[in-house]
Image (tube, rainbow, N blue to C red):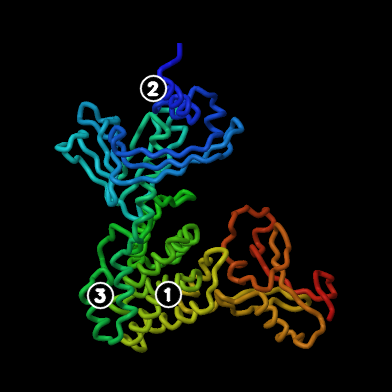
């Protein structure tokens, strides 16, 4: 019996939907390989169980089974959903336990409510800026707890969110990262004032800026946040705390310099921290400029401690261009305020060092720091063949080539056709030194402390040798 025309039309439409894997919204019955190899385009509207408008583009990409699939998701805010947040219990249950909340991600914050109703009470909000960060879910947490964790770091709070589904966790991480990336860079008050100082012309305007903004001037109390912006979750590494915490700790260390009779060891510790965490170099420069601006007793011993550390910093690290301009303006203003003072002489020493400093392989030794504190050069002993030890005055920027030329002039070898080189000798090795190497780095503290043999105790840890073609050590005749 022939089927009615309407029934034939329905069977054809159903067959067509089945071929397109659109079986009335149900999953196709074909194999997984067929589904993954197929290219598709889906559009879900707000009517689909309250989900936000989302476009999924699926294109072939390689998978473990040999098929390919690639997803591109476009999010529209606000993005709501149920997540579990780790909260601390009361007196009877002081441990951390997850509770389910209704989260809503907007263009400015991540809010959570007691429920999904319109009248639900807002229980908290995490403001999102360019300094926020999100940690991707890791498999280890899932193995331990059975939940995929999403961690959001904010200025004052850290939200640890949990969900049972990996795709949902990835969905939230991508949406959060998109909001954070879209935010303009955060500028601290110190950065904004640095820009104002740079564009200010008249000295009266400059004095007014310092007078109205105590954050730029000396303070005897602690600081609770860095002067420059750092990501809230920036790790320190190498046994350090976070970058923001280390910046606050270093300011406390700077304040301790005021009461120390011999601050060289503490200064070396500050320099070592900046060497291990280069992101803190600009921060320490700004802190030192702050502590040398409008001090309570200009020129006193406590004030000169900051200038001495600033001399060590300028001979070891070069700041970024904005901080360099800020520092140069500070040195110029100090010279105008206190001409012929100790601070002015330190300022000139610092300005000269900044023109030569390119970067150091290691922090200065205690002997070099003592020389920098007194704005003096350091002596370097060089052992020459058939000649007594020659002592050459070097600075933090003196290179091996400059020392070799100095020795050639002293020994009357300036017109010699032979070329000469410097060698470093220790109980472990004897090696030639590159011409562009800094002598201060060779004389500085070793990167790895290795105890010398007992018969080496009376010998110096390192010394230099100049040898010509007679010794046959890497020399050439022109």
Q: Secondary structure at mark 2?
A: helix
For residue 96, above or below residue 156? above
Image point (56%, 77%), residue name: 395
Task: Report which residue position mark 1 lands on.
Answer: 324
Spot occupied by residue 72 in the image (x, y as percentages of width and height): 46, 44
Can residue 83 be seen from the camera position used here?
no
Spot occupied by residue 150 in the image (x, y as percentages of width and height): 38, 39
Task: Report which residue position mark 2 lands on.
Answer: 6
Image point (57%, 36%), residue name: 68
Task: Judge depth for marks 2 and 3 and give the one in front.
Answer: 2
For residue 128, above or below residue 304? above
Q: Quadrant of residue 162?
A: top left
Q: Mark 1 vs mark 2: which is more N-terminal?
A: 2
Bin the neighbour count of mark 2 within 10 Å (Cα to Cα): few under 14, some 14-19, many 20 and up. few
Q: Nearer the viewer, residue 203 or 298?
A: 203
**Which quarter of the image is occupied by the C terminus?**
bottom right
Using the numbered discs, state the Cα–Cα distance from disc 1 to disc 2 in whole angstroms: 82 Å
Q: Mark 2 vs mark 3: which is more N-terminal?
A: 2
Bin the neighbour count of mark 1 within 10 Å (Cα to Cα): few under 14, some 14-19, many 20 and up. some
Task: Report which residue position mark 3 lands on.
Answer: 296
Image point (57%, 62%), residue name: 445
**Is the residue under label 1 in contact with that under label 3 (CB below 8 Å)?**
no
Image point (52%, 41%), residue name: 59
Using the numbered discs, state the Cα–Cα distance from disc 2 to disc 3 in whole angstroms: 96 Å
Spot occupied by residue 193 in the image (x, y as percentages of width and height): 29, 72
Spot occupied by residue 393 in the image (x, y as percentages of width and height): 59, 79
Task: Judge depth for marks 3 and 1 and give the one in front.
Answer: 1
Q: Secondary structure at mark 3?
A: loop
Q: Secondary structure at mark 1?
A: helix
Q: Nearer the viewer, residue 263 or 458?
A: 263
Q: Quadrant of residue 113?
A: top left
């Amino acid at each position: 019996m022939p089927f009615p025309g309407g029934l034939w039309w329905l069977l054809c439409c159903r067959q067509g939907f089945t071929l397109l894997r659109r079986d009335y919204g149900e999953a196709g019955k074909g194999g997984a390989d067929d589904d993954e190899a197929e290219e598709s385009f889906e559009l879900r509207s707000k009517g689909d169980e309250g989900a936000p408008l989302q476009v999924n583009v699926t294109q072939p990409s390689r998978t473990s089974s040999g098929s390919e699939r690639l997803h591109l998701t476009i999010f529209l805010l606000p993005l709501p959903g149920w997540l579990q947040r780790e909260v601390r219990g009361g007196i009877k249950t002081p441990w951390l336990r997850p509770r389910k909340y209704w989260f809503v991600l907007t263009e400015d914050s991540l809010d959570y409510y007691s429920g999904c109703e319109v009248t639900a009470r807002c229980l908290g909000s995490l403001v999102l800026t360019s300094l926020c960060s999100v940690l991707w879910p890791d498999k280890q947490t899932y193995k331990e707890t059975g939940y995929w964790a999403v961690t959001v770091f904010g200025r004052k709070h850290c939200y640890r969110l949990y969900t049972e589904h990996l795709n949902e966790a990835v969905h939230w991480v991508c949406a959060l990262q998109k909001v954070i990336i879209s935010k303009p860079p955060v500028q601290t008050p110190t950065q904004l004032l640095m820009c104002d100082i740079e564009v200010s012309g008249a000295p009266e305007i400059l004095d007014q800026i310092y007078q109205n903004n105590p954050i730029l001037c000396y303070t005897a109390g602690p600081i609770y946040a860095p002067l420059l912006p750092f990501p809230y979750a920036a790790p320190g590494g190498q046994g350090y705390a976070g970058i923001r915490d280390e910046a606050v700790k270093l300011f406390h260390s700077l304040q301790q310099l005021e009461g120390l009779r011999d601050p060289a060891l503490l200064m070396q510790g500050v320099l070592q921290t900046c060497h291990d965490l280069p992101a803190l170099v600009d921060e320490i420069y700004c802190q030192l400029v702050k502590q040398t601006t409008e001090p309570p007793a200009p020129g006193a011993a406590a004030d000169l401690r900051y200038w001495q550390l600033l001399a060590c910093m300028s001979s070891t690290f070069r700041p970024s261009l904005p901080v360099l301009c800020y520092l140069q303006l500070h040195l110029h203003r100090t010279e105008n305020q206190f001409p012929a003072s100790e601070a002015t002489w330190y300022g000139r020493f610092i300005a000269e060092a900044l023109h030569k400093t390119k970067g150091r392989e290691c922090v200065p030794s205690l002997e070099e720091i003592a020389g920098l504190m007194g704005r003096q050069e350091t002596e370097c002993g060089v052992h020459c063949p058939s000649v007594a030890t020659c002592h050459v005055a070097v600075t933090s920027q003196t290179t091996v080539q400059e020392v070799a030329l100095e020795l050639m002039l002293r020994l009357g070898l300036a017109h010699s056709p032979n070329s000469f080189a410097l060698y470093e000798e220790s109980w472990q090795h004897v090696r030639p030194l590159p011409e562009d190497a800094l002598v201060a780095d060779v004389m500085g503290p070793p990167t790895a402390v290795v105890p010398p043999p007992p018969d080496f105790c009376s010998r110096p840890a390192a010394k230099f040798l100049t040898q010509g073609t007679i010794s046959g050590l890497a020399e050439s005749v022109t």
